Image: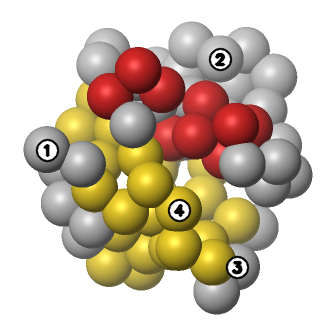
Amino acid sequence: MSFSITVEEREIAFLAEDKNILNTLERENIESHFHCRDGFCGACRCTLKKGTVEYSEYPLAFIGGGEILTCCAYPTSDIVIEID
């Protein structure tokens, strides 16, 4: 099953081989901040406006309400995110 990610008014497809949202953003040349790629630093933190995600490994960085880390999250529904 494939889900869509809407970011910056652009809808893109999340592909299973991407493994996480950050990889999808990179594949589509959408600029996003990141540093560690493992959920430790929180640099890839963004706002989840709609939808649901799960984590391949629960991140150690602080995540506030309504926030996700794109480096280790993958969608479990169509999602809308806002990159800060």
Q: CA distance from mark 3 to mark 1?
A: 23 Å
- The three-letter code of the residue at mark 4 reads Ile
Image-based side of 78 in relation to 14, left or right: left
User: Residue flagged by tag 2: what amino acid is it?
Assistant: Arg
Q: CA distance from mark 1 to mark 4?
A: 14 Å
Q: Going by the image, does 47 lie left or right of 57?
A: right
Q: How is the image coloured?
A: secondary structure
**Label 3 environment density (alpha carbons within 10 Å; few <14, some 14–19, many ≥20):** few
Q: Residues within 10 Å of mark 1 (few under 14, many from 20)?
A: few
**Residue to which mark 1 is pinned:** 1
Circles 4 and 2: CB distance less than 8 Å? no
Which numbered mark, 4 or 2, is in the foreground of this view? 4
The residue under label 3 is which amino acid type?
A: Glu
**Above or below, 42 relative to 10:** above
| Sequence-first disc among 1 and 2 | 1
Q: Position of residue 63 (x, y in %)?
A: 46, 47
Please tell me whether mark 4 sits on a helix, a strand or a loop. strand
In this figure, which residue is indicated by the disc labeled 2?
Answer: 37
Q: Horizontally, is 61 left or right of 5 in the view?
A: right
Whichever of labels 4 and 2 marks the residue nearer the N terminus, that label is 4
Q: CA distance from mark 1 to mark 2?
A: 24 Å
Relative to 51, residue 22 above or below: above
Whole-number angstrom distance, CA of label 3 to CA of label 2: 22 Å
Question: Going from the N terminus, do you reach mark 1 or mark 4 first?
Answer: 1
Q: Tell me which residue sits at (37%, 63%) in the image.
A: 4
Foreground pick, 74 / 59: 74
Q: Which residue is mark 3?
A: 8
Mark 2 residue element: loop
